[in-house]
Amino acid sequence: MSAVLHPHGHGADHAHDDHHGAPHGWRRWVYATNHKDIGTLYLLFAFTMLIIGGVLALGIRAELFKPGLQLVNPELFNQLTTMHGLIMVFGAIMPAFVGFANWMIPLQIGASDMAFARMNNFSFWLMIPAAAILAGSFFMPGGAPAGGWTIYAPLTLQMGPSMDAAIFALHILGASSIMGSINIIVTILNMRAPGMTLMKMPMFVWTWLITAYLLIAVMPVLAGAITMTLTDRHFGTTFFNPAAGGDPVMFQHIFWFFGHPEVYIMILPAFGIISQIVPAFSRKKLFGYASMVYATSSIAILSFIVWAHHMYTTGMPVTGQLFFMYATMLISVPTGVKVFNWIATMWKGSMTFETPMLFAVGFIFVFTMGGFTGLILSMAPIDLQLQDGYYVVAHFHYVLVAGSLFTMFAGYYYWSPKWTGVMYNETRGKIHFWWTLISFNVTFFPMHFLGLAGMPRRYADYPMQFADFNALASVGAFAFGIAQVYFFFFVVLPTMRGKGEPAPQRPWEAAEGLEWEVPSPAPFHTFETPPKLNSDATRIVA
Amino acid sequence: MMNNIYKKFEKASIALFALASTMAWAVNDLPGGPAVRQLNLHPPVTKIAEEQVWLHWFMLIICTVIFVAVFGVMFYSIWKHRKSVGHKAASFHESLKVEIAWTVVPFVIVILMALPATKAVVASKDTSNADLTIKATGYQWKWGYDYIKGEGEGIGFISTLDNAQREMSNSGKPEPTDDYLLKVDNPLVVPVNQKVRIITTSNDVIHSFAVNSFGIKQDAIPGFVRDTWFRAEKTGDFHGQCQELCGKEHAYMPIHVKVVSAEEYTAWVAEQNKKMAAKQDDPNKVWTLADLMQKGEKVYAANCQACHQANGKGMGPIKPLDGAAVVLDTDKVKQIKVLLNGQNNLAMPAWKQLSDSEIAAVISYTKNNWSNKTGQLVQPAEVLAARQ
């Protein structure tokens, strides 16, 4: 069995399958314990949430197209911005990377499945009620939460029952993430094929190993912050209520202690995907593998000591501002090292530019722009002008969309032949890439100017001098959204239906990794016995 | 078929961009506020802002140079090292020397960037020896200014977004206005070339006081006092907006600082003192219903209408006043207490900063307007008694 919905006669791969009770129909999916199926579930779920979060964004951009309130009142606008953030972060980006992890980690390390296959199922299916609660909160009295995705106290103490629903949903999602991370760590540490030492693992596996530790460290901290919010709201505590001795700024400290590693959780797996794709399409090994491992680890460790750069204007003393400024600026060093290593991989390679490589190169270019605006924001004096404005919005969309999302597209194009057994349509892939790249920049580049000019974020209406760039951003946003609908219907769906050229086992001639040692599509069960590997741990020897 | 789709897409995008370009709004640059299609930071009016502008250029230039260099190399490689031009892949894949170089050099660059930044941070935090100290209190959704120390101390007032502009926003079709959403009834007035210390706090949730031309931004946090400072070196009108999400009217609580010459400031202080003396409520005055209704209507429009609407019907979670139990209640103290103390964790804010006669008038107005016909009057003395 493969991951395609309606497989079209890929007869040969059944030779290796034991069909003892291999599930069919709805039971296959509800009781799924197979890492490939669970990976598919996560990816489809994440894409659905991407579209929902995207529709909310289009609501925001439609309202901001012109000055004046045309479509929504300010309360609903605040709900749109809040839910767009929560759904994209917790419903789209994080689950998508978990989907990639599920599909690829066992394949890349030569394991038969994840360590805890049933817990894996639970991790996924927990997300469905959580997402339903989150999305459904729009229909609760008072509407969805409207405190920003950062849900600062004491504003959250004023929200209606949807705030409690969101807290509940976040707890469930956090539990799902923690279980998933435990699964990933145990799998990677215990189930690698003999001969695959840690320093021979694919970079995607390394980045997920590090990300999983970050998740376990910080999801409980978020749980703490939102539980304190819940008890303040309903159980008489006053953690964040200053009238009774509480401290609203403490919420920010706790939240951002989670929040900053969280953004690295959302980018490290992306770095891993790029580190797989660039060598494949440069026909040259990744430059500086050890350095890349150390750089990723440094980024992860540093991510714990920079959180208050989100709080420069809260009134911390000079020493605090200086410390967090220096620590944050420091993260740019290992990040720069990674960019240099990717370019050194390309240098004097023999490159071709199929869609995965287009997205990978596009990522390096546009993510680095986001990195530079991050460096500029890290300078506390400059941040005094830019904090809570559109420059920040531009920065994080550059690193999250042009960063994380682009690598997911790259990963899809790179690995979907292995998942589905057919090649996607290369022309349409290129259309998707250029359409996405251009519309993304049309949407978010003007926001740098808006931020420098002083336009605050989370504003339903704005002074008219900001109108032209807002209009431009809105046009770009709709173009970007349509590009993703095109992607699903014209690129993804045909491959899921098995329509396309049959994919060879190794569609990319220089791609390395154990996933390319199994047929396309990958059989339902792979590496049921640990493979014997060559000295590089990249090929199976007979 | 692809060609057809491509042509359609081309036509659609041209139409869309044509539409977008006709949307250019006929407003002018606002001095001290945003300029039309402004590309960079505001022109600085304080030394601190000047340093920030300089620092930003410094960072932008360095980052652009590095960016162009690095991506120049990458695009050169994309051009020259392609399989399609016959380039064969080399086999190198590590170099300790190179890794050390491109770790150490960026590290040094980052340290060099941190030096001027440190200077600017330390300068912007030094609020000592101010000539004038003003407390800015964030409310949902307006600013309160109290002059605490220096010339003008004792002056206090609320600064609210101009009501007509708020209505324009609701209409969905605002007229081109240069200071749209930036105009207030009572701007903050300060003298030029004097060190002004702004203390920020809040009455309810976190807000943030910011004036970009001055290079200042300081969160206004309930239960805490924070401070910042500025010395404006030019006279004029300077604008800012609330910079921390504070609820539904977050976009509607602007900051307007009027920097005037020393003589103009002194004159303004005298005028304010006269006004405040005149406003002192006579606690024993007994008002007629007609007078209360007239005053109450004004108070309602300025303070309540944004949430409870002109028709008193509220919206969404905002409760209606027309037909509301607490408004129709024979026990007037109930409604007085709601106004003084707020309700629902301050989702309905407290309004104790309004005067007794303002509160008495607006309650009387709600009790006798729309379909409410209680015939009840509330006198300022009753409000004063409820405050105890």
Image (tube, coloured by chain):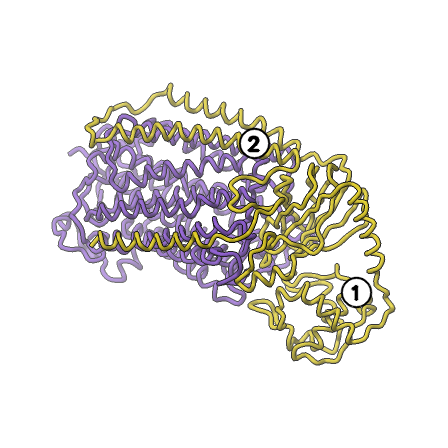
Chain colours: A purple, B yellow
Q: Residue at x 55, y 48 (%)?
A: A455
Q: Amino acid at mark 2?
A: Leu
Question: How many numbered marks, from 0 up?
Answer: 2
* Residue A49 percent coordinates (x, y): 38, 55
Q: Could you confirm whether marks 1 and 2 are on the same chain?
A: yes
Of callouts 1 and 2, the N-terminal one: 2
> Between tags 1 and 2, which lies in front?
2
- Badge 2 sits on which subunit? B
Q: Residue at x 25, y 54 (%)?
A: B5
Q: Quadrant of residue A53?
A: bottom left
Q: Quadrant of residue A58?
A: bottom left
B278 shown above or below B95: below
Q: Residue at x 60, y 38 (%)?
A: B43
* Residue A114 percent coordinates (x, y): 31, 46
A160 shown above or below A219: below
Which residue is nearer to you in this view: A513 or A216? A513
**In the picture provided, is A364 more to the left or to the right than B175?**
left
**In the picture provided, is B384 more to the left or to the right than A304?**
right
Can you name the residue that lies furthest to the right here?
Answer: B284
Q: Which mark is residue A324?
A: none
Gap in angstroms between the C-alphas marked 1 and 2: 50 Å
Q: Is residue A249 visible?
A: yes
Name the residue carrying label 1.
Answer: B356
Please tell me whether mark 2 sits on a helix, a strand or a loop: helix
* Residue A218 percent coordinates (x, y): 49, 44
**In the picture provided, is A342 more to the left or to the right than B288?**
left
Q: Which mark is residue B55?
A: 2
* Residue A142 percent coordinates (x, y): 54, 65
